[in-house]
Image (cartoon, rainbow, N blue to C red):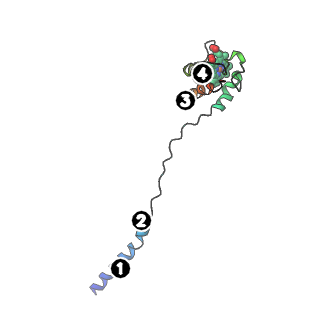
Amino acid sequence: MQKFSLLFVLALIVLACGGGEDTSSEAPMAKKEAAPAAKDINVKKIWKVRCIACHGLYGDMGTNGAANLQESTKDLDYRINIIKNGSENGVMTAFGEILDEDEIKAMAEYTMTFKKE
Ligand code: HEC
Protein backbone atom coordinates (compact mmCIF):
# COMPACT_ATOMS: atom_id res chain seq x y z
CA MET A 1 0.00 0.00 0.00
CA GLN A 2 2.82 2.38 0.91
CA LYS A 3 4.50 1.78 -2.43
CA PHE A 4 1.28 2.44 -4.28
CA SER A 5 0.67 5.86 -2.73
CA LEU A 6 4.28 6.84 -3.41
CA LEU A 7 3.78 6.00 -7.08
CA PHE A 8 0.57 7.97 -7.03
CA VAL A 9 2.33 11.05 -5.68
CA LEU A 10 5.13 10.69 -8.22
CA ALA A 11 2.57 10.41 -10.98
CA LEU A 12 0.90 13.59 -9.79
CA ILE A 13 4.20 15.46 -9.80
CA VAL A 14 5.01 14.28 -13.31
CA LEU A 15 1.56 15.33 -14.50
CA ALA A 16 1.82 18.69 -12.84
CA CYS A 17 5.13 19.42 -14.49
CA GLY A 18 4.20 17.94 -17.84
CA GLY A 19 3.95 20.41 -20.65
CA GLY A 20 5.89 22.97 -18.70
CA GLU A 21 8.80 22.60 -21.02
CA ASP A 22 6.81 23.65 -24.05
CA THR A 23 6.02 27.11 -22.79
CA SER A 24 9.49 27.75 -21.43
CA SER A 25 11.05 27.04 -24.83
CA GLU A 26 9.14 29.95 -26.31
CA ALA A 27 11.55 32.78 -26.98
CA PRO A 28 10.76 35.85 -24.96
CA MET A 29 9.44 38.68 -27.10
CA ALA A 30 12.32 40.84 -28.16
CA LYS A 31 11.85 43.99 -26.20
CA LYS A 32 12.55 47.01 -28.30
CA GLU A 33 13.14 50.18 -26.39
CA ALA A 34 11.93 53.01 -28.54
CA ALA A 35 14.89 55.28 -29.17
CA PRO A 36 14.16 58.76 -27.88
CA ALA A 37 12.76 60.42 -30.95
CA ALA A 38 14.99 63.17 -32.21
CA LYS A 39 13.08 66.35 -31.79
CA ASP A 40 11.20 67.01 -34.92
CA ILE A 41 11.62 70.67 -35.74
CA ASN A 42 9.43 71.77 -38.58
CA VAL A 43 11.47 74.68 -39.91
CA LYS A 44 9.11 75.37 -42.77
CA LYS A 45 6.19 75.68 -40.44
CA ILE A 46 8.06 77.99 -38.08
CA TRP A 47 9.17 80.00 -41.09
CA LYS A 48 5.59 80.43 -42.27
CA VAL A 49 4.33 81.37 -38.84
CA ARG A 50 7.16 83.58 -37.59
CA CYS A 51 9.31 84.84 -40.41
CA ILE A 52 7.39 84.99 -43.65
CA ALA A 53 5.71 88.32 -42.91
CA CYS A 54 9.00 90.15 -43.32
CA HIS A 55 11.26 87.80 -45.24
CA GLY A 56 8.72 86.22 -47.56
CA LEU A 57 8.42 82.59 -48.58
CA TYR A 58 11.70 82.66 -50.47
CA GLY A 59 13.61 84.95 -48.13
CA ASP A 60 13.75 87.89 -50.53
CA MET A 61 10.61 89.84 -49.79
CA GLY A 62 12.28 92.52 -47.69
CA THR A 63 9.23 93.84 -45.83
CA ASN A 64 10.24 96.42 -43.22
CA GLY A 65 13.75 96.34 -44.65
CA ALA A 66 14.21 92.66 -43.83
CA ALA A 67 17.51 91.38 -45.10
CA ASN A 68 17.39 89.52 -48.39
CA LEU A 69 18.33 86.02 -47.35
CA GLN A 70 19.05 84.94 -50.90
CA GLU A 71 21.89 87.42 -50.96
CA SER A 72 22.96 87.30 -47.35
CA THR A 73 26.54 86.28 -46.71
CA LYS A 74 26.17 86.24 -42.93
CA ASP A 75 27.51 83.17 -41.16
CA LEU A 76 25.60 80.80 -38.93
CA ASP A 77 26.64 82.45 -35.65
CA TYR A 78 25.47 85.83 -36.86
CA ARG A 79 22.14 84.34 -37.86
CA ILE A 80 21.66 82.49 -34.60
CA ASN A 81 22.35 85.73 -32.76
CA ILE A 82 19.98 87.88 -34.77
CA ILE A 83 17.18 85.33 -34.53
CA LYS A 84 17.68 85.03 -30.79
CA ASN A 85 18.14 88.71 -29.98
CA GLY A 86 16.51 90.51 -32.86
CA SER A 87 18.14 93.09 -35.09
CA GLU A 88 20.01 96.01 -33.61
CA ASN A 89 17.61 98.47 -35.23
CA GLY A 90 14.80 96.68 -33.47
CA VAL A 91 12.88 95.88 -36.63
CA MET A 92 13.39 92.14 -36.51
CA THR A 93 11.75 90.59 -33.49
CA ALA A 94 13.84 88.70 -30.94
CA PHE A 95 12.81 85.09 -30.94
CA GLY A 96 14.86 84.02 -27.93
CA GLU A 97 11.79 83.70 -25.77
CA ILE A 98 9.61 82.17 -28.45
CA LEU A 99 11.84 79.51 -29.91
CA ASP A 100 14.21 77.24 -28.01
CA GLU A 101 17.93 76.89 -28.73
CA ASP A 102 17.48 73.94 -31.07
CA GLU A 103 14.77 75.68 -33.01
CA ILE A 104 16.81 78.86 -33.35
CA LYS A 105 19.76 76.91 -34.67
CA ALA A 106 17.52 74.98 -37.07
CA MET A 107 16.02 78.24 -38.30
CA ALA A 108 19.46 79.80 -38.75
CA GLU A 109 20.48 76.80 -40.83
CA TYR A 110 17.26 77.01 -42.77
CA THR A 111 17.90 80.64 -43.71
CA MET A 112 21.19 79.49 -45.26
CA THR A 113 19.23 77.40 -47.76
CA PHE A 114 17.71 80.44 -49.47
CA LYS A 115 21.03 81.47 -50.87
CA LYS A 116 21.23 81.28 -54.61
CA GLU A 117 24.34 79.82 -56.09
C1 HEC B 1 9.30 92.10 -38.25
C2 HEC B 1 10.01 91.69 -39.42
C3 HEC B 1 10.89 90.45 -39.31
C4 HEC B 1 10.55 89.19 -38.91
C5 HEC B 1 9.19 88.70 -38.41
C6 HEC B 1 11.72 88.36 -39.04
N1 HEC B 1 12.77 89.13 -39.53
FE1 HEC B 1 14.62 88.45 -39.89
N2 HEC B 1 15.21 90.35 -40.37
C7 HEC B 1 14.39 91.47 -40.38
C8 HEC B 1 15.18 92.64 -40.67
C9 HEC B 1 14.65 94.06 -40.76
C10 HEC B 1 16.50 92.21 -40.83
C11 HEC B 1 17.73 93.05 -41.10
C12 HEC B 1 18.26 93.53 -39.79
C13 HEC B 1 19.54 94.31 -39.90
O1 HEC B 1 20.12 94.35 -40.98
O2 HEC B 1 19.97 94.82 -38.87
C14 HEC B 1 16.48 90.75 -40.64
C15 HEC B 1 17.61 89.94 -40.73
C16 HEC B 1 17.58 88.57 -40.58
C17 HEC B 1 18.74 87.73 -40.72
C18 HEC B 1 20.16 88.19 -41.00
C19 HEC B 1 20.44 88.19 -42.45
C20 HEC B 1 21.46 89.23 -42.85
O3 HEC B 1 22.08 89.04 -43.89
O4 HEC B 1 21.60 90.23 -42.14
C21 HEC B 1 18.33 86.44 -40.53
C22 HEC B 1 19.18 85.19 -40.61
C23 HEC B 1 16.91 86.49 -40.24
N3 HEC B 1 16.49 87.79 -40.30
C24 HEC B 1 16.15 85.38 -39.98
C25 HEC B 1 14.83 85.46 -39.55
C26 HEC B 1 14.10 84.33 -39.08
C27 HEC B 1 14.61 82.90 -39.02
C28 HEC B 1 12.88 84.78 -38.70
C29 HEC B 1 11.74 83.99 -38.07
C30 HEC B 1 12.06 83.21 -36.92
C31 HEC B 1 12.85 86.21 -38.96
N4 HEC B 1 14.07 86.58 -39.46
C32 HEC B 1 11.78 87.03 -38.74
C33 HEC B 1 13.04 91.47 -40.16
C34 HEC B 1 12.29 90.39 -39.70
Q: Amino acid at mark 2?
A: Ser
The residue tagged 2 is 24
Q: Earlier in the sequence, mark 2 or mark 4?
A: 2
Q: Is residue 24 visible?
A: yes
Q: Amino acid at mark 3?
A: Asp
- Closer to the camera in the image, 71 or 17: 71
The residue tagged 4 is 83
Q: CA distance from mark 3 to mark 1?
A: 68 Å
Q: CA distance from mark 3 to mark 4?
A: 12 Å
Looking at the rendered image, the quarter that the N terminus falls into is bottom left
Within 10 Å of the Cα at label 3, are there few (<14), some (14-19), or many (20+) other Cα atoms? few
Q: Nearer the viewer, mark 3 or mark 1?
A: 3
Q: Amino acid at mark 1?
A: Ala
Q: Residue furthest front?
A: 117
Left or right? Give the position of 19 relative to 85. left
The residue tagged 3 is 102
Left or right? Give the position of 63 relative to 112. right
Give the image location of residue 59, x and y in percent: 68, 23
Picture quadrant of residue 39: top right
Residue 11 circle label? 1
Within 10 Å of the Cα at label 1, are there few (<14), some (14-19), or many (20+) other Cα atoms? few
- Per the image, label 3 sits on a secondary structure element best described as helix
Q: Earlier in the sequence, mark 3 or mark 2?
A: 2
Q: Earlier in the sequence, mark 1 or mark 4?
A: 1
Q: CA distance from mark 2 to mark 4?
A: 60 Å
Q: CA distance from mark 1 to mark 4?
A: 80 Å
Left or right? Give the position of 56 relative to 113. right
Within 10 Å of the Cα at label 4, are there few (<14), some (14-19), or many (20+) other Cα atoms? many
- Per the image, label 2 sits on a secondary structure element best described as helix
